[in-house]
Every structure is written in C-alpha cells, then in structure tokens.
C-alpha cells in the first residue's frame, strides 16, 4: 500500500484532496486545475506559438494552476506577477552553470527516503511529491510532480517515522513535500497521530500553499485533523504577492488560526514579482492583518532554469532596509539564504551594528533612516 497513490489520482479515496472538477462547458468560467499546455491555451494564458515552444518545458517540469490562481492573472499584462509565478516560459530551459538539481543539499542530509535531518533538533518530512500548483521557481522542481514518484509508500513512511522515534534530539517535525495539505484529512490525521505519539516531538509544522492557492481545501475536517493532538501545531503559509491574499485565502487562514494553529509566512524574493518595497510592504502587512506572522523572506535558491527570477543579494538587503523603515517589527520577515551544499540557512539582511575601529568599547549603530550613531558598550 502507498501512503498516497503514486499515480496521483485526485480523489479522496486515494488520500489526496480534489483541486477542481475536470470538465467545463464552452463559455463557462474556469473551474478546474490547468495541467497541460492545451489547458493553458484554452484559458488564453499562452498563445498557439507558445504551445509549441513550451513542449520541452512541460516535459521536464510539472504544471498545475488552480482556478483561484487563474482568476488572479491579468491576461492583458505581459509582466503580470501572478502569471510569472505559475505559467511556464521558455526561460526555464536556460540552465546556468551554477544551478544544480538539489540546490540546498536535501539528499546529502537524508538518512532515509523522504526525511532530511539538516539541523540537530528538527527534521523535514517530505510526505508527498505533489502540489496543488507548481511554482516556476521551485527549488525542488526536479523532484516534485505526478511523474516524479515523490510520494512515500507505507514502508518508506514507517522508516521515516521510525528514524524520528529513534532520535530523541528531534523536537520539531516539519511536514513538507510537495505540499502536505493536499492529503485528505484522513491521511493527515493518520500522520499527525503517529508523530504525536513520539514523546520527544513537541512541535509539528506544516509547509503549504493550500490556503492561498486552493482555500476551499481548508475544511472543518482538515482543521480537526491538524488539531487532533495536544502537540503545538504551526502552519507556514507560502505567498509571494499581496494579490494572493484574497478574501477566500484570508478566510481560510483565519479558520486555521481560529482553531489555535499558529501561522507564519514564507516568501521568496522574486524578480518581477515582489522585488520592490511597495509590494513587499503590502504583502507583509497583509500577512499580519490575516493573523500570519512574517517569518522568512528567502533569497532564491539556485534551482535549474530559475535564474530569471533571481535578485542580487545587495538589492535584497536594500529592500529589507527599506522595509525596516516602513514596518513595525511585528511585520518584518528575516531575509535568509540557504547555503548550497546542505550547510544550512542563515540571515543575510543588512547589518545595523559594527564595532568602531577607533574604540574597542564602542559600536556604530545604523537607525532605520540610515543614520549611524555611536553606542558605548557597558562592561
């Protein structure tokens, strides 16, 4: 038996939730997840010429765009930030010399299939290899998708849970994938019960885009499954643009928060999507207004064919400095880089303090307006 069906049949019987119906009469609004070039063409999101040009792209990387995301795309804007995140382009075949298939070194820190033990007190459990949408910049893009056999079968899940049980230093389990909230509530409940039965696991965190890209999946049954144990549960919501925080998305997040789940955010700094201070400010404010604590702003990982999304670190640091001037600490994310080669995640935001070279007991501290002040340290 498989933990989820390897064939990725989208049905509750197989353990994965439905994202949208599969048939649509001519002239009706979009009501299904787009998965093929023909789907994208029928929805007028790509041209006939692009349909031909993109054959190699979709042969290599999975495509899925939910109805909720389709509704947000401005077809009249060739630089639309929503389309840029989800609609394939020929630029994805441009693989640069420094881009690698496993940019943060998951495989180097994987003791058993589907588990990454990079940090002492926590592990990442990749329970599924499928998502409701496929981001064109995904750092696991060569590992996710219905054709990549990324779902754990029962034996593999047993090995992963057994490893967690055998390592008492593991305090937190981060459930990811893929997107684990595509699992049915029944499957989520089964998994969370197994993790909660391990005494030294105190925190269970779920990484997902579901509340934003398919908010209807956040049902009472899903919430009940996530909160069915006495463990602390966190949900990290991935969103990159304020337009993603629709009324439905906010309602889904509030449903989670209202059940006692703590919500944090994850965003990726993306050229042409959110690499201006106004967009980032609106996104972070939107998170806080929805009950989500801004957590990480990721510098782009060097996944193959994603160079056209990458923002220079210096530009990212400038943006974060500008955000500090505009936002309260409650709304500030931490700008981070995952060091290639499995060396871990580190903050790379602008430094606000440096030692005064003329006085070993003094520091120069930069305020939010960019003005330096001398601070005398007490000893």
Image (tube, rainbow, N blue to C red):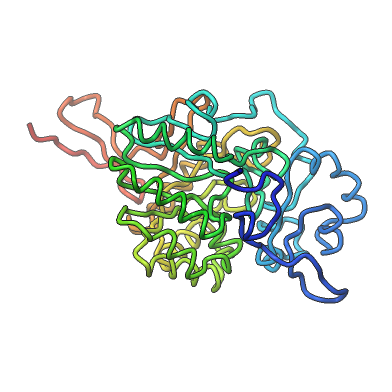
Q: 286 or 246: which is nearer to us?
A: 246
Left or right, 228 with reference to 112? left
- Quadrant showing the N terminus: top right
- The x and y percentages for residue 47 are 88, 56
Q: Residue furthest left?
A: 379
- The x and y percentages for residue 143 are 64, 36
Q: What residue is rendered at 44% in x and 70% in y?
A: 255
Q: Residue furthest front?
A: 1
- Residue 183 image-quadrant placement: bottom right
Left or right, 128 with reference to 111? right
Q: Residue furthest bottom?
A: 27
Q: How many numbered marks, from 0 up?
A: 0
Up-down: is 47 above or below 310?
below
Up-down: is 249 above or below 193?
below
- Quadrant showing the C terminus: top left
- The x and y percentages for residue 29 are 77, 74
Left or right, 314 with reference to 375? right
Up-down: is 103 above or below 203?
above
Q: What residue is rendered at 70% in x and 28% in y?
A: 96
- The x and y percentages for residue 234 are 39, 54
Q: 33 or 93: which is nearer to us?
A: 33
Q: What residue is rendered at 75% in x and 62% in y?
A: 77
- Residue 150 image-quadrant placement: top right
Q: 240 or 31: which is nearer to us?
A: 31
Q: 25 or 288: which is nearer to us?
A: 25
Left or right, 41 with reference to 353? right
Q: What residue is rendered at 15% in x and 28% in y?
A: 361
């Amino acid at each position: 038996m498989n933990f989820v069906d390897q064939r990725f049949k989208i049905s509750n019987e197989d353990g994965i939730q439905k994202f949208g119906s599969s048939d649509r009469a001519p002239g009706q609004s979009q009501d299904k997840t787009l998965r093929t070039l023909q789907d994208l063409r029928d929805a007028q999101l790509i041209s006939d010429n692009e349909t031909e040009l993109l054959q190699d792209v979709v042969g290599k990387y999975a495509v899925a765009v939910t109805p909720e995301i389709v509704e947000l795309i401005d077809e009249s804007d060739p630089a639309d930030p929503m389309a840029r995140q989800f609609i394939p382009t020929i630029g994805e075949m441009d693989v640069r010399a420094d881009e690698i298939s496993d940019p943060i070194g998951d495989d180097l820190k994987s003791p058993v299939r589907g588990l990454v033990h990079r940090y002492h007190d926590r592990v990442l459990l990749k329970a599924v290899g499928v998502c409701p949408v496929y981001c064109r910049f995904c750092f696991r893009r060569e590992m996710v998708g219905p054709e990549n056999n990324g779902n754990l079968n029962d034996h593999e899940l047993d090995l992963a849970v057994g490893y967690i049980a055998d390592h008492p230093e593991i305090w937190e389990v981060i459930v990811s994938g893929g997107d684990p909230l595509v699992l049915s509530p029944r499957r989520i409940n089964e998994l969370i019960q197994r993790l909660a039965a391990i005494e030294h696991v105190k925190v269970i965190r779920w990484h997902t885009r579901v509340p934003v890209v398919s908010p209807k999946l956040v049902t009472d049954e899903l919430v009940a499954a996530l909160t069915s144990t006495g463990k602390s549960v966190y949900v990290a919501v991935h969103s990159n643009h304020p337009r993603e925080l629709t009324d439905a998305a906010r309602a889904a997040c509030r449903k989670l928060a209202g059940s006692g789940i703590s919500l944090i955010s994850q965003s990726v700094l993306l050229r042409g999507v959110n690499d201006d201070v106004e967009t980032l400010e609106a996104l972070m404010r939107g998170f806080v207004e929805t009950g989500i604590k801004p957590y990480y702003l990721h510098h782009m990982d060097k996944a193959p064919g994603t160079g056209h999304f990458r923002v220079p670190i210096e530009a990212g640091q400038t943006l974060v400095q500008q955000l500090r001037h505009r936002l309260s600490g409650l709304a500030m994310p931490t700008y981070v880089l995952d060091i290639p080669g499995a060396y871990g995640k580190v903050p790379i935001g602008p430094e606000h303090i440096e030692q005064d070279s003329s006085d070993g007991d003094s520091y120069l501290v930069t305020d939010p307006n960019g003005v330096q002040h001398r601070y005398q340290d007490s000893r």
